[in-house]
Image (cartoon, grey):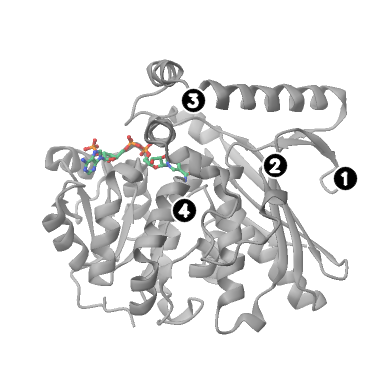
Amino acid sequence: MARNGISRPYDIVLYGASGFVGRQTVAYLVEHAAALRWALAGRSKERLDAVRKACGADGAKLIVADATDERALDQLASRARVVLSTAGPFARYGSELVAACVRHGTHYVDITGETPWVHRMIVQHHAAAARHGTRIVPGCGFDSVPSDLGAWLVARALWQQHGERCVDVKACFSMRGGLNGGTLASALNALDTGDAKLMDDPFLLNPPGTAPTDAGAHADPLAPHRDTDFGAWVGPFVMGPINTRVVRRSAALLGAAPSADASPFAPSFRYQEYLRFGRGAAAALAAAGASAAMQAGRGAMKLKTARRLAAALAPAPGEGPSQRTMDRGSFRCELVARGERGAVVRGRIAGTGDPGNRATTRFVCEAALALVLDADALPGGHGLGGVLTPSTAFGDVLVRRLQAAGMTVETS
Ligand SMILES: NC(=O)c1ccc[n+]([C@@H]2O[C@H](COP(=O)([O-])OP(=O)(O)OC[C@H]3O[C@@H](n4cnc5c(N)ncnc54)[C@H](OP(=O)(O)O)[C@@H]3O)[C@@H](O)[C@H]2O)c1
């Protein structure tokens, strides 16, 4: 059972509060968690104090803890019921914090998209977190909530409405938004350290022994195609290699659970996702151009000089899109699920605001609030723990919270 409880001084400690996403997370919590006890944490007291003032978070306490300071992180984790981290690259600033949360039975959510780092956290901590009922949930931002919650939702609807297990889900994204310096820094860090090579494994996040024998058939798509389910040209989606591994972990975790009979996923389950380009010849050309550019970009990024150039031209860590870009952003994730006897269910997750900032902030804050306010309703009950995924950790609780927060989360 999770050891953390109401007696701890803070319901939520927000780590990385002075970063670009962190500042927006503070603003969200001011608006939606005023009745809770929470604290802002990070490496610099001055920067935390400035954020607290700027966001009107007057009641929030400050906790100073560098990402390498094990003692300070132990103290931080021991005083929180839930740690929410926005400090990335997570491969640089996240490992000691996760370890401290596992040591102290403190639930944890973050917004990482660094799959190789998540793989390491699974190897190092899944067993202990599972033993103690501690929920460690990476990937609670735009990577990978729409994909993961969406795939589970349509698969579950197939099971409930048609009595068929799900053999296939496809997702198709449309989005408008900007790029954060922190996101680029995280991607470049994975390339610099060699972590990115691990992404070749489509089942990198699966529990041992659960990857299918035909793993190669689940490789990330490289070319565009006209998809009849979506009635549009689609091509490789830049977040696909991240999100697909999370969805596959969810299916494997549910299939391996003691109540595996209730898993909506068939053992042969497949998941793939795409970027939508639209109909007609212009869309076909755009899809072909974008797919080729993505391939070329991936190739170029293997060169250190190209990475240094990208870092120099793009926003620096701490920077991100303008308010206007974030306000005018949006995303839409359409999903199609097929059952083992051919039944089809469609679903949709959509919202307004820049996906990497507005939507990400909403996703991760609602996940943290679910851990604090809806603990009795979470899937698996109080005893469920481990390095989990958004759908296995939160399920319907997060669906309802996102709907209440103004997002579209629905199945046909
Ligand atoms: N899932 C998604 O869709 C999504 C969306 C956006 C971002 N992200 C990810 O979220 C992460 C943050 O993005 P961002 O744009 O907010 O980046 P950012 O503005 O650069 O923020 C980085 C944060 O890390 C902190 N930090 C740096 N060194 C530290 C240290 N030694 N100890 C403790 N904290 C330290 C920074 O603190 P200081 O302020 O003191 O420098 C800052 O709070 C990135 O990994 C990015 O990839 C994910």
Q: Secondary structure at mark 3?
A: loop
Give the tally of numbered discs: 4
Q: CA distance from mark 1 to mark 3?
A: 35 Å
Q: Secondary structure at mark 2?
A: strand
Q: In this view of the protein, can residue 338 be seen by the observer?
A: yes
Residue depth check, mark 3 versus mark 2: number of the one nearer the observer: 3
State which tag comes first along the sequence, 4 or 3: 4
Q: CA distance from mark 3 to mark 2?
A: 23 Å
Per the image, the residue denoted by label 3 is 302
Ligand 1 under 8 Å from disc 3 Cβ: no
Q: Position of residue 335 (x, y in %)?
A: 72, 54
Tell me whether circle 1 and circle 3 mark residues in contact (CB < 8 Å). no
- In the rendered view, does 23 fall on the left or right side of 363? left
Q: Secondary structure at mark 1?
A: loop
> Identity of the amino acid at label 1?
Thr
**Camera-nearest residue between 229 and 369:** 229
Q: Position of residue 402 (x, y in %)?
A: 54, 59
> Identity of the amino acid at label 2?
Tyr
> Identity of the amino acid at label 3?
Lys
**Image point (46%, 65%), residue name:** 388
Q: CA distance from mark 4 to mark 3?
A: 25 Å
User: Quick one: label 4, few (<14), some, or many (20+) residues within 10 Å?
Assistant: many
Q: Write down which quadrant ligand 1 falls in.
A: top left
Q: CA distance from mark 4 to mark 2?
A: 19 Å
**Image point (59%, 84%), residue name:** 259
Q: Position of residue 153 (x, y in %)?
A: 66, 65
**Camera-nearest residue between 405 and 91:** 91
* Quadrant of the frame with the C terminus: bottom right
Q: Is residue 287 above or below residue 258?
A: above
State which tag comes first along the sequence, 3 or 2: 2
Per the image, the residue denoted by label 2 is 274
